[in-house]
Image (cartoon, grey):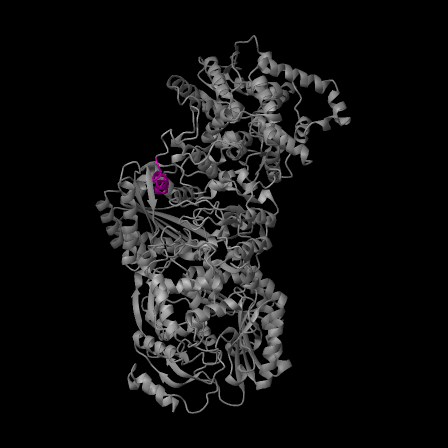
């Protein structure tokens, strides 16, 4: 049997307790492996990759499994390489405000550790308890606070990775400013593990905000123009919101019990500055809107809730209903349209829709729940509308069966040959996350 | 300036001239070309074959295609202010000068972005939107004349990147002419995270070796509501360095955090913009915080407290914009000011982890003593970007060589503590060999592999950024390829 | 100079004369280019670089070419001449340069070499020769040319010429100049021919001498009048040495350094008894201050020139520094101020004229963007390089605010050029000299007093 042969080959690289045979039944989300391995050292990872490369095996990379439903049209690869046991802080010099950490470290673990030093990684991804830093970087996850703090590409200053041929490659470094050679970090951030296995991530840190609050502004009329002009007013002021997230009425209902379009405006700074900014928002508050202000822990609790509203690949919903999650990118203010169009899918396509998007950065997350064919046509419909706005739709979570039907990345870009060229240079045998990326890379 | 006849027998020159519409847009006489034999880095010089001045993307694409089809090496050039030689035509390239593509194409305040042509000058962008209260954040000290196209190629930094990041953090979209003449658009409409590998991030900082940028969408920011600047004098460098770390550790993210040592202070006080720094202090810090007015005072108090805890001799807050301006002028003209105390200087651009500052400064002192040359230190202390200025006199035989060796030793010192060899000036020709201080052969190969995808014939800006070929890297690679072929 | 210069030092030394292709004495000074590190901070300050985007038409490019001739890499030929003579000599690069490289000085020295290597021919040569050698140095000829112009204007011939399109036989740019020729009045030096000293009104505080200037005194004699009025009103005895001559600026700009030296010597003689030499033409003032440059190879005259140049001061700076009576009458007008290159970049006088204007009641100052950008006049540049001068002027005029009534400045060359700009682009501003406005305010004050 093939699996047995594989197992015995792998035994020369790893100890037996580091590997288990794959799931017997087909997983809803696919992306399984005949054998799941849990390497503990970089050397083991390199050896496994070298072996796979030489023996034309396919490897799927995983750790927290939150993104198991993100991309890929293969039920099971030869090896599922899990970094779940490859975790821990490698280096942290508080005075440098930089941190090197192993890829399999769960995000929350990381933040809790840093909080002791009054520092943080300034990213706010979904499912922080499960999602690992490696996965967050590989899938380029960001949250509402991207407006204030940027994304993975603004935070990562160095990566260490294993190439498919087993070579260890470092990109960037440990310093916050670096233009030596190509900015290779960028290439690997968001590459969905198709180029190499990230083993260590070095990031620049931010101080924990001394104070934070959240202004929730709900608009009873649901008038897009009204929300738009308020947002423009706020963005054109000298206020510095760290988040300016528009919630769809359904999501607003779920989070704060108001079935209305709601703007979540986050402020983080020293206390006096935060209150000063709240006052400013009060001053320009549209006449018929409702305002609620949450301070400190309450504000944090709100954001924590937002981070767990989407589907989690590690614990997919059971039952007949299908879950989908979409990442939509448009020009900043077009977020208003996207949220509105998404909201309408509820009636036209009989699906449950929860959507939110950052007016200051243009990225939306739309979560859908419903019957398979409804989800399929809803995604189709949404993609059409977004294309007209010049934007894109990426389906971040979808059962394998539907991923085989829907191109989750959308049309290939005109420069697809470059993406292909990069992939075939680095991973000519397509060992890593085969067909999981744009255009079947 | 009337259009003249093209007087040459070189068919390539004639054909290139035809593409750009005649004699006003091409230079090919030796006398004119000589002005293009280097950029801001003058240690190497070489004449280009010709210099062409396209007016739009189509012309760039045609020029590139022509060069590519005819195996003519070529490169793009902006204002030519680069400090590492990225625009020097070492192989007698056809220089494609982007300076006539200098329009501001659009400004969209609501969505906080602007679209510019590559020849648009950095500072002009801020000047064009400042009346509305907006600005473009990356501010290299050459911003008065450097182009945004060049900034993209070099991933330019500046004094304020500690808080706001460097060029790559502000680029939303690019139109690029690839080395085969094909035009592509990345980050269409300036929307972030387009599906696919982040070519935007890869091309930014690729020093003109992957393609020629012809249109740039940048993020623009709202001016901060308030700004405060502090000057602090220290009697020893270690206290000054510790204060830097303490400020950062206190949870303050200053907009800028600059430091000068005693020798540097001697220079700036002897030059055009003295501000009366005491002559006997060992270090001065220039700290700027900006943001919401209501929060500034608290941060300033914290900074003053930190400085006092680190035995500051004197610390003061700028009383008005005039005083702030004088402090900055004093700092920003620091390099040029060295002319006042030394015949020549060599500037380096290492970066170190902030906490290693005292250690590396000691090492630089040592290097200075060993070489018998003074080294002034002016640096972006906040992000650990050092600019050691090796002072020497080229007229004294052997001193230039000593200075070069000392400069390289400074970079080695940075690399030794986990730092890097360039923070904002780029590798270019200057630091090709020093790339080995920070990267293994395999890592350098990984990068040239990427270049091959974009620039397979290596006609575009060849010989930059990576150690000279023909050495072990290439040989090993050949072996590897043979090995692969066999297996 | 940075280490980067060293690359060149690996070549045989550039200071030995064997390599240099400068064949005449007074060659470009090595010390002037040695400071250039090729950083490029000068680029955007240069009007010709702005227009062409070409390095050889930029300050650092020109410096590099000038240096290359000295190193034997280039010859003094047509191709070299082009960029060197396309320079407006506006000195904006000197202001922009962090290392204080004297680009203007280098350019003038290089022009000296070029003119000797390849004398001018063709119409440019004739015009140049006529103005530089035939007219400017000879006050009487200038006067009679002035008289001729005056006759031409008064006689109505001007109208005839304009109407009958006779004017079209002239090259276009000369036509434009003709259209804005100021009305010619009696020159100051003629008027005060018999007065040794024009006494201060009231108590004498200082004694000064006035350089009346060649063109200024003929074409803009009323500005000279105003200058005398302002000086005497503020306690200055003014003398006008009769044997003074043209400052030589235009000759030096054009590469005729020999004539420049001749004129310099005559002026140094003429003003040898003066403690203070006042100029109201920025170009002249700058030239006088730079006389030492002409005598680098002549220690005796160099010393005299140093002494002389220390005495030279622009009227606006002099008045500002020694104190002046603030006018009380209101001149209700909106104005903008243009920095003459040779005042702002050449002499560092920027704030003083603005302060003076703002001290006049009722004057509202509107900011002109890029106020210190060259207007394209640059001596006789507008005659010799009409196309580039025209482009520079166009870009200048775009910066002139729409809603001002006057444009004030401190240099006659600029005044002619800006007047041409106003005419050419259908604008309606009056062109005035800073000191004229101050004088008018005084006069108005006196009139009002007289009326009481």
Number of numbered callouts drawn: 0
Q: Position of residue B244 (x, y in %)?
A: 32, 54
The percent coordinates of residue B233 (x first, y second) are 30, 46
Say if the magenta span includes residue B135: no
| Left or right for C276, reference B353 | right
Instruction: Judge whether A398 appears above or below B58 on screen.
Output: below
Which one is nearer the viewer's eye here, A18 or B217? A18
Inspect this view and state whether residue B363 appears: yes
Queried whether the magenta region covers residue C2, the answer comes back as yes
Name which residue lies at 35% across and 88% down: A5
Q: Can you say whether A30 is above or below B461 in the image?
A: below
Q: Nearer the viewer, residue A330 or C138?
A: C138
Quarter of the image where one finds residue A213 = bottom left
Of residues C415 and C47, the one nearer the viewer is C47
Residue B265 as seen in the image, left or right of residue A309: left
For residue C149, which quarter of the picture? top right
Residue B275: percent from left, percent from top: 36, 39
Q: Position of residue A245 (x, y in %)?
A: 52, 69
Q: Is residue A287 something that shows in the picture?
A: no
Instruction: Judge whether B18 appears above or below C359 on screen.
Output: below
Q: Is residue C140 above or below residue C310?
A: above
* Residue positioned 46% across, 76% down in the render: A305
Magenta residues span C1-12
Residue sitting farthest toward the top? C194
Looking at the rendered image, the quarter that the N terminus of chain A falls into is bottom left
């Amino acid at each position: 049997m093939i699996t047995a042969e594989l197992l015995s080959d792998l035994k020369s690289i790893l100890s037996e307790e580091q590997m288990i045979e794959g799931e017997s039944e087909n997983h809803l989300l696919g992306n399984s492996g005949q054998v799941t391995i849990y390497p503990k050292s970089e050397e083991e990872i390199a050896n496994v990759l070298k072996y796979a490369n030489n023996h034309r095996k396919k490897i799927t990379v995983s750790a927290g499994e939150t993104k198991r439903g993100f991309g890929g049209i293969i039920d099971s690869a030869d090896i599922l390489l899990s970094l779940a046991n490859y975790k821990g802080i490698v280096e942290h010099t508080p005075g440098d405000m930089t941190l090197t950490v192993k890829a399999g470290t769960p995000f929350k673990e990381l933040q809790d550790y840093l909080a002791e030093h009054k520092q943080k990684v300034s990213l706010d991804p979904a499912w922080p308890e499960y999602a690992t830093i490696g996965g967050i970087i590989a899938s380029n996850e960001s949250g509402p606070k991207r407006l204030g703090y940027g994304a993975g590409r603004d935070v990562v200053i160095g990566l260490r990775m294993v190439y498919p041929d087993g070579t260890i490659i470092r990109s960037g470094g440990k310093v916050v400013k670096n233009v030596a050679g190509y900015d290779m970090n960028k290439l690997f951030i968001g590459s969905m593990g198709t180029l190499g296995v990230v083993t260590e991530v070095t990031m620049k840190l931010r101080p924990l905000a001394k104070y934070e609050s959240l202004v929730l502004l709900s608009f009873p009329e649901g008038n897009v123009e009204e929300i738009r002009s308020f947002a423009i007013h706020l963005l054109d002021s000298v206020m510095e919101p760290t988040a300016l997230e528009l919630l769809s009425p359904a999501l607003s209902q779920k989070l704060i019990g108001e079935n209305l379009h709601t703007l979540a405006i986050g402020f983080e700074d020293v206390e006096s500055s935060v209150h000063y900014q709240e006052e400013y928002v009060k001053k320009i508050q549209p006449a018929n809107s409702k305002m609620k202000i949450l301070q400190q822990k309450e504000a944090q609790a709100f954001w924590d809730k937002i981070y767990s509203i989407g589907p989690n690949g590690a614990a997919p919903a059971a039952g007949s209903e299908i879950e989908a999650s979409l990442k939509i990118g448009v020009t900043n203010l077009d977020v208003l349209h996207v949220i509105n169009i998404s909201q309408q899918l509820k009636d036209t396509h009989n699906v449950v829709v929860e959507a939110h998007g950052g007016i200051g950065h243009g990225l939306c997350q739309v979560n859908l729940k419903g019957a398979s064919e409804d989800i399929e046509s809803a995604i189709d419909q949404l993609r059409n509308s977004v294309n007209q706005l010049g934007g894109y739709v990426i389906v971040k979570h979808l059962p394998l069966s539907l991923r085989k039907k829907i191109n989750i990345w959308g049309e290939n870009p005109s420069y697809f040959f470059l993406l292909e060229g990069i992939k075939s240079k680095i991973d000519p045998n397509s060992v890593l996350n085969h067909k999981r990326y744009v255009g079947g890379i | 300036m009337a259009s003249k006849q093209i007087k040459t027998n070189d068919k390539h020159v004639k054909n290139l001239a035809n593409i750009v519409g005649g004699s006003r847009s091409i230079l090919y006489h030796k006398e004119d070309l000589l002005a293009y034999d280097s950029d801001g880095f003058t240690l190497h010089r070489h004449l280009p074959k010709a210099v062409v001045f396209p007016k739009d993307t189509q012309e760039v694409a045609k020029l590139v295609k022509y060069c590519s089809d005819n195996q003519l090496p070529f490169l793009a050039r902006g204002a030519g202010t680069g400090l590492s030689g990225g625009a020097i035509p070492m192989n007698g390239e056809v220089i494609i000068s982007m300076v006539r593509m200098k329009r501001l194409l659009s400004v969209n305040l609501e969505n906080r972005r602007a679209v510019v042509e590559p020849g648009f000058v950095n500072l002009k962008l801020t000047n064009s939107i400042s009346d509305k209260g907006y600005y473009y954040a990356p501010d290299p000290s050459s911003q008065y004349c450097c182009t945004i196209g060049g900034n993209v190629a070099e991933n330019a930094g500046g004094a304020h990147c500690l808080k706001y990041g460097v060029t790559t953090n502000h680029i939303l979209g690019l139109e690029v002419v690839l080395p085969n003449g094909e035009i592509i658009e990345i980050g269409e409409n300036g929307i972030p995270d387009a599906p696919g590998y982040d070519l935007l991030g890869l091309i930014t900082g690729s020093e003109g070796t992957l393609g020629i940028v012809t249109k740039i969408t940048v993020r623009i920011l709202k001016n901060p509501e308030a700004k405060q600047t502090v000057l602090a004098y220290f009697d020893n460098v270690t206290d000054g360095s510790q204060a830097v770390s303490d400020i950062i550790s206190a949870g303050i993210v200053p907009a800028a955090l600059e430091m000068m040592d005693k020798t540097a202070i001697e220079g700036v006080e002897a030059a055009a913009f003295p501000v009366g720094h005491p002559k006997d202090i060992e270090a001065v810090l220039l700290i700027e915080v900006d943001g919401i007015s209501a929060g500034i005072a608290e941060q300033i108090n914290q900074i003053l407290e930190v400085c006092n805890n680190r035995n500051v001799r004197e610390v003061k807050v700028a009383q008005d914009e005039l005083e702030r301006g004088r402090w900055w002028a004093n700092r920003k003209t620091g390099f040029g000011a060295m002319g006042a105390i030394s015949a020549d200087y060599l500037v380096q651009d290492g970066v170190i982890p902030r906490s290693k500052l005292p250690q590396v400064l000691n090492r630089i002192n040592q290097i200075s003593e060993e070489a018998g040359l003074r080294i002034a230190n002016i640096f972006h202390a906040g992000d650990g970007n050092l600019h050691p200025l090796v002072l020497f006199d080229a007229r004294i035989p052997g001193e230039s060589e000593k200075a070069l060796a000392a400069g390289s030793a400074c970079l080695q010192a940075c690399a030794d503590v986990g730092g890097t060899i360039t923070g904002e000036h780029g590798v270019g020709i200057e630091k090709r060999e020093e790339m080995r201080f920070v990267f293994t052969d395999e890592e350098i190969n990984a990068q040239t592999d990427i270049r091959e995808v974009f620039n397979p014939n290596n006609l575009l800006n060849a010989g930059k950024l990576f150690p000279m070929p023909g050495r072990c890297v290439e040989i090993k690679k050949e072996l590897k390829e043979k090995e692969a072929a066999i297996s | 100079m940075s280490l980067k210069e060293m690359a060149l030092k690996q070549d045989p030394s550039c200071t030995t004369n064997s390599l240099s292709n400068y064949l005449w004495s007074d060659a470009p000074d090595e010390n002037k280019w040695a400071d250039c590190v090729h950083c490029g901070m000068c680029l955007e300050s240069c009007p010709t670089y702005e227009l062409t985007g070409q390095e050889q038409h930029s300050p650092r490019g020109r410096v590099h070419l000038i240096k290359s001739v000295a190193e034997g890499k280039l010859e003094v030929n047509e191709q070299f001449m082009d960029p060197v003579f396309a320079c407006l000599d506006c000195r904006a690069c000197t202001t922009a340069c962090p290392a204080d490289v004297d680009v203007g000085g280098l350019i003038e020295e290089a022009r000296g070499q070029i003119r000797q290597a390849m004398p001018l021919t063709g119409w440019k040569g004739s015009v140049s020769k006529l103005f530089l050698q035939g007219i400017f140095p000879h006050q009487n000829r200038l006067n009679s040319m002035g008289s001729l112009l005056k006759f031409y204007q008064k006689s109505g011939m001007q109208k005839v010429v304009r109407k009958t399109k006779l004017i079209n036989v002239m090259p276009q740019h000369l036509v434009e100049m003709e259209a804005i020729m100021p009305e010619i009045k009696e020159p100051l030096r003629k008027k005060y021919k018999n007065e040794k000293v024009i006494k201060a009104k009231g108590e004498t505080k200082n004694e000064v001498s006035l350089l009346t200037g060649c063109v200024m005194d003929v074409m803009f004699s009323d500005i000279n009048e105003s200058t005398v009025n302002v000086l005497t009103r503020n306690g200055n005895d003014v003398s006008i040495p009769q044997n003074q001559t043209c400052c030589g600026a235009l000759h030096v700009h054009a590469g005729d350094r020999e004539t420049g030296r001749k004129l310099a010597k005559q002026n140094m003689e003429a003003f040898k008894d003066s403690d203070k030499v006042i100029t109201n033409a920025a170009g002249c003032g700058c030239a006088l201050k730079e006389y030492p440059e002409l005598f680098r190879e002549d220690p005796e005259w160099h010393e005299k020139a140093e002494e002389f140049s220390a005495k030279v001061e622009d009227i606006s700076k002099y008045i500002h520094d020694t104190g002046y009576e603030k006018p009380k009458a209101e001149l209700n007008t909106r104005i903008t101020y243009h920095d003459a290159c040779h005042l702002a970049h050449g002499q560092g006088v920027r704030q003083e004229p603005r302060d003076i204007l703002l001290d006049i009641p009722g004057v509202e100052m509107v900011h002109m963007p890029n106020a210190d950008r060259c207007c394209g006049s640059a001596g006789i540049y507008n005659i010799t390089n009409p196309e580039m001068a025209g482009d520079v002027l166009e870009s200048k005029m775009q910066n002139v605010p729409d809603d001002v009534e006057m444009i004030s400045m401190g240099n006659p060359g600029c005044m002619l050029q800006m007047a041409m700009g106003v005419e050419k682009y259908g604008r309606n501003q009056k062109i005035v000299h800073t000191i004229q406005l101050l004088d008018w305010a005084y006069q108005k004050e006196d009139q009002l007093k007289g009326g009481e």
